[in-house]
Image (cartoon, rainbow, N blue to C red):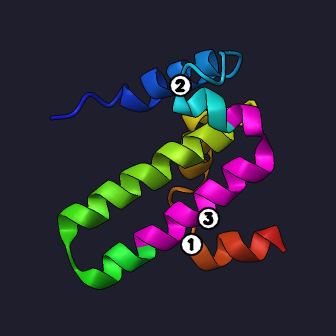
Amino acid sequence: MVNPDILNRLAETLAARQGADPASSYTASLMHKGLDAILKKVGEEAVETVLAAKDGDKLHLVREVADLWFHTLVLLSHQGLGPNDVLAELARREGISGIDEKNARG
């Protein structure tokens, strides 16, 4: 079984890379480029995830979702957020009808 703390450990690593030398890591380089570059990468990974799902190759899909999750975590970190913020929102929504939750957002 995979350690459930992986998201928190990854978030800690991402936070540490925010101020790192862009030449030292891919993540530091992406964060140094700023929000638009991060958003572009999240969009690319989302499209690749959709295409992998349509292909029906489960391993390819898992790898693309991992890329999407990683880049989404980079985005959250760049915005001063982390996986616990998203998990708290999911916990808040638990047991609420998706229709009701969407209607409550207006």
Q: Quadrant of the C terminus?
A: bottom right
Instruction: Tell me: 74 left or right of 67.
Output: right
Which residues are drawn in magenta? Answer: 31-49
Q: Amino acid at mark 1?
A: Ser
Q: Quadrant of residue 64?
A: bottom left
Q: How many marks?
A: 3
- Which numbered disc covers residue 25? 2
The residue sitting at 37% across, 28% down in the picture is 6
Please state if 33 lies on the left or on the right of 88 as rendered.
Answer: right
Q: Which amino acid is tagged 3? A: Gly
89 or 16: nearer the eye? Answer: 16
Compute the Cα span from label 2 to label 1: 42 Å
**106 over 20 or under it: above or below:** below
Proximity of marks 2 and 3: CB atoms separated by less than 8 Å: no
Label 3 and label 1: CA atoms lie apart by: 28 Å
Name the residue that disc number 3 marks.
Answer: 43
Question: x, y percentage for residue 67?
Answer: 43, 51
Q: Tell me which numbered mark, 2 or 3, is placed earlier along the sequence.
A: 2
The residue that appears at 78% across and 45% down in the rendered structure is 35
Q: Classify 106 as above or below 3.
A: below
Q: Which mark is residue 50?
A: none
Q: CA distance from mark 2 to mark 3?
A: 21 Å
In this view of the protein, can residue 81 be seen by the observer? no
Q: Quadrant of residue 15?
A: top right
Front in this rendered view, residue 41 or 106: 41
Q: Quadrant of residue 50?
A: bottom left
In the image, is residue 30 above or below residue 104? Answer: above
Give residue 97's mark.
1
